[in-house]
Amino acid sequence: MAALCSEFGDLVQIKKQLISVISLCKERGLVNSVKWASELAFALDPLPNNELPPPTFFTEEDAQDLDALGLAKSYFDLKEYDRAAFFLRGCRSQKAYFLYMYSRYLSGEKKKDDETVDSLGPLEKGQVRNEALRELRVELSKKHSAGELDGFALYLYGVVLRKLDLLKEAVDVFVEATHALPLHWGAWLELCNLITNIEMLKSLSLPDCWIRDFFMAHMYTELQMIKEALQKYQSLIEAGFSKSTYIMSQIAVAYHNIRDIDQALALFNELREQDPFRIENMDTFSNLLYVRSMKPELSYLAHNLVEIDKYRVETCCVIGNYYSLRSQHEKAALYFQRALKLNPRCLGAWTLMGHEYMEMKNTSAAIQAYRHAIEVNKRDYRAWYGLGQTYEILKMPFYCLYYYRKAHQLRPNDSRMLVALGESYEKLSQHVEAKKCYWRAYSVGDVERMALLKLAKLHEQLNESDDAAQCYIIYIQDIFSCGEQLEHAEVSTALRYLGQYYFKNKLYDEASLCAQRCCDYNDAREEGKALLRQISQVRDQTESSTTDLFGPLSSNNTPIRRVSPLDLSSFTP
């Protein structure tokens, strides 16, 4: 069990803190932080009346700004941001100052989004900027230098810096915000989006409080450190958050990331039972249904979400996946575009739209979509992998190699990235590197069962017959042991090669066995029969005994395990 902060021993105190921060965030219009804290608070036992935290303390400045703040907050809630900012001018309290600056920021964002939707296509969103950002940065910078920003204002300053692509400064400010107000989840989440690797995470000086464990679990998931993430979430469940739908959804996403589809589906189904009107994370659920080709379930999910809220980003992504599964790629791309109109920073929609453009053979649009996905989140291995695939179609292997390497760095134990890397090296005639990639792909657990086959064919091209035979033997034994031999057309290719290999090495019993197996496959039947006739003719002329299959292997850089002669006697096709 992963070690947790000592504060988890007092859940009553944590509940009090959550109730307090919910009130603080509500007053400032930070709805997502309110939702996150409320979900966690709901997962804990209710507090008795005498344990409830006292009302928020009012300063003299708060009292003077109370009426203006109440009026402005009512306009803010109606999304009349300029109007809210107008009535907050001259207010002196920290709360009013934050709402004043936040209203100006959101006003700029709203105008930017309106201009984007009105004038540009979905692939050109990056060209419109929030005009208010520079003014906000200047004003917040002065206050920051004077040490006059509280935790909420520091969070807003960090958001402004991130939007201006001043990422290093933004990280420093978000860390400062977490120290000033550790219970504000929004600051932790923004920080999470800026951390690119585990070394950077370890280098940050973060406050030692219970919310840090939630942040670390989230961060491990983002950095594809799924084992550590699952351990951390399990520890949080055991600490008292067993009823938390947030933790359940995060565990489901973690299983999705390691392609443990059965576990992820089970958790998402349980999540929908506990929270049937939930829309958050349902796009990830639809990805799993898509991979499993579960059309009825995906159709039901899409209809259900449309009934709840058809103008949510997740709903559009689910409908897009549904049409993609039905091979209606133009309709699918249309719904992903709708999702991006609702939220231009929706990572999943950019990546999925890239996939749809790939299906439609529109490589230039696919490249643009994948690049936008990387702008949103540089840790999205699917976008890097998609870029590699598009440049592969364009026959640009050096570009492929660059993007596949990026994807591999993010997913070092994903066999698909390694196989793609191997293919790129092979096209560039870097055979030693290609062999290493294929063997590594097999070693980490080859999802598509193609690595050994490609390695064998590469050895075959290089006239390394002993090593090619070894790879084909391991490939066939793996396929036969899973009972999938008739589903893999390439099995006949392996058997055909091994039959000829054994025949050349005068191992007629093994050659005969491979030839007989070839007769089970339509594309290899005639060659199998011809080989059997050849073996029969040779045996009529002379009796030959079978000896050990291989001598020492030819020296190369591919590690090959020793195997016994091909034994398929215990398997039936």
Image (spheres, rainbow, N blue to C red):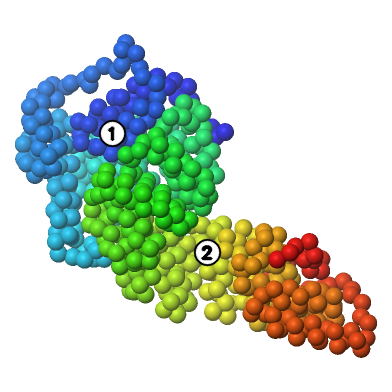
State which quarter of the image contains the N terminus: top right
Q: In this picture, is 163 found above or below 268?
A: below
Could you tell me which secondary element the residue under label 1 belongs to? helix
Residue 180 shows up from this direction: no
Furthest-right residue in this view = 543
Q: Residue at x 39, y 34 (%)?
A: 274
Q: Which residue has dot 1 on it?
A: 34
Q: Nearer the viewer, residue 433 or 468?
A: 468
Residue 114 place in picture, x, y as percent = 14, 56
Q: For label 2, count other residues whose C-alpha is less than 10 Å away and answer few (under 14), some (14-19) or many (20+).
A: many
Q: In this picture, is 385 found above or below 77?
A: below
Residue 329 place in picture, x, y as percent = 34, 67
Q: In this picture, is 175 found above or below 52?
A: below
Per the model, the C-alpha gap separating discs 2 and 1 is 39 Å
Indicate the quadrant where residue 128 lies: bottom left
- Amino acid bearing label 1: Val
Q: Nearer the viewer, residue 24 or 174?
A: 24
- Amino acid bearing label 2: Met
Pick whichever of labels 2 and 1 is earlier in the sequence: 1
340 relative position to 374: left or right: left
Q: Which mark is residue 352?
A: none
Q: Residue at x 85, y 75 (%)?
A: 509
Q: Residue at x 57, y 71 (%)?
A: 422
Q: Which residue has dot 2 on it?
A: 417
Residue 470 shows up from this direction: yes
351 relative position to 152: left or right: right
State which quarter of the image contains the C terminus: bottom right
